[in-house]
Amino acid sequence: MSEIFTKGMARNIYYGGGFFFLLLLVGLTLDTLRELPQRDHRENITESVARGKAVWEENNCIGCHSLMGEGAYFAPELANVYDRYGNGNEAAFAQFMQSWMAMQPLPTEGRRKMPQFHLSKEQVDDLSAFLIWTSRINDNDWPPNREG
Amino acid sequence: MKFESQRVAKPYFIFALMLFVGQILFGLILGLQYIVGDFLFPYIPFNVARMVHTNLLIVWLLFGFMGASYYLVPEESDTELHSPWLAKATFWVFAAAGVATILGYLLVPYGELAELTMNHLLPTMGREFLEQPTITKIGIVIVCLAFIYNIGMTVLKGRKTVINMVLITGLVGLAVFFLFSFYNPANLVLDKFFWWWVVHLWVEGVWELILGAILAFVLIKVTGVDREVIEKWLYVIIALALISGLIGMGHHYFWIGPGPYWLWLGSIFSALEPVPFFMMVLFAFRVVSQRRHQHGNRVATLWALGTAVMAFLGAGVWGFIHTLAPVNYYTHGSQITAAHGHLAFFGAYAMIVMCIISYAMPIMRGRPQGNPAVAQKLETFAFWTMCISMLGITLALTVAGAWQVALQRLPESGALSFMNTQAKLIPVFWVREAFGLVFATGLVAYLASFFVGQKAAVNTYVVETHATEAAGEFKAQGACCGSCK
């Protein structure tokens, strides 16, 4: 690099630029935090939804599935599983979840297997509530289609 | 080696490589599970193997960063490490906590592990890469604090070089952003939003400072190029990394709840993220071409150049191909993401750790001019085998991802389901697994390179020592390892 561009200038770009963009990030974060309540519908986070999130976490569901596209890519996306199998009927989805979870692991040889987690009926209902709430987050219309 | 206390880096490097072996073994298991879905089920379900694979990666890189810091900071500061004793103690604490956590993953169902470690008191488990029990996370914080205290005190009492300052900024950032892993609200959107403050601000933020500092250190040592030149490059590279990377975090905010302006911010700034990596390639090659001396440890130079190139490809190019929002809409969470993850982590972080190991280990073993030729030859073979096979893995996953998008994401009607799509991808997953086996071969060769040519080494030193003594140079040191630069 030329002599006109000195080390001091490079240092100032690093400290100045780094600090400025960190502040910008904090500012944008504050703005996003203000906007989020309209997008995540947090008023609908019931006790059951919160418990469902804990069930999701304590069984490491993210270790195989993705949720809003994040997680592992070994098993189907679940942020829209309610749209895929619920047909807009919460009770029917909860019923489907009860039987689906009880069926695991499916006996098909060579197929990817979901372990049997031995969840109680209430835990599966909580999980359903969590996934239904998740499906209604405004996520800029992702995924492109119902297959996730 | 200038200071005796630099030697504490050795166990860190050795343990890092042991964990690396574990990571690759579990990688091979995972690759096979993509093909034979029920392989090892129910003994090692996919989620457990993946957690072990990714957590081992993170922990071995942390061990590598710590070893690198303990090696280079005393030398840069021109003083002994503040407390070698503390460095040894934290090594054993971190190693024990790491092993206990991995055994916990493997021996107990995750739900029981959560119960056993009383996750309900402060729930932090069950989020990607942050699966560690809360107690382990607290342990990581304590180890990091002790480590940064030790490094910080050393810098404070010694020379404050640019490399030292950049490294310590990166390490402090690493510790500070990790604290966000303790924030886990019931609101999934907030949880995800700040989860990225750990994950993105680590790998696309402060870790790049650590990477830059280590690379600059090795380049000074193996090329003898003037520090002033290298420091200017370092500042420019990390400045661009932060300027692009901080707001570039927006590319993770496209589809998880935050508003549409992130589509623009994330696309524009993250499209700039390859620039600092490209600068790093220019930097490395220019500095090596301007070298003042030919260091005997040629393979260390190869690692330095390789790190810059592979980081540019993995983090830069493979990041760019799916970072623009209109593209990411279709590729988000597909095998394209996996392709990028593999090449970026290997090229940027695994390779920089192997680079500093390649430079520092021989010196700590009394070989200031690097390993004997036969060992360097084997290490060079391992370098190319690992690099090429990782490119193979990446290309295979890229093909799998593109195919997945075409079958599952693009069609507006009649799209294949996730499971049916995955079944179609099995031939490509075989290719990936084959390259995985080649990678494992490269790793074995790499480890073997530490043990070959022992006898030859002794002979070379006798000859070299006589030669330099005759020349009247470097009498005390035997040969120049670059440490005095």
Image (tube, helix red, strand yellow):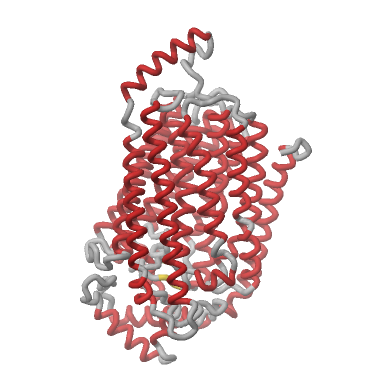
| Residue name at image x 35 percent, y 59 percent | B431
B415 lies above or below B337:
below
A58 lies above or below A88:
above
B44 lies above or below B64:
below
Instruction: Say which of B178 and B481 sits in front.
Output: B481
Left or right: residue B337 compared with residue B434: right
Camera sees residue B98: no
Image quarter of the C terminus of chain A? bottom left
* Relative image position of residue B95 (x, y in whole percent): 35, 44
| Residue name at image x 60 percent, y 41 percent | B166
Left or right: residue A20 compared with residue A119: right
Image quarter of the N terminus of chain A? top right
| Residue name at image x 48 percent, y 47 percent | B349
* Relative image position of residue B482 (x, y in whole percent): 53, 25
| Residue name at image x 62 percent, y 69 percent | B262
Question: Count the marks: how many?
Answer: 0
Residue B418 in which image quadrant = bottom left
Instruction: Say which of B460 and A97 sits in front.
Output: B460
A91 lies above or below B202:
below
Instruction: Say which of A113 and B106 sits in front.
Output: A113
Instruction: Say which of B324 and A27 sits in front.
Output: B324
* Relative image position of residue B271 (x, y in whole percent): 62, 60
Camera sees residue B423: yes
* Relative image position of residue A92 (x, y in whole percent): 36, 91
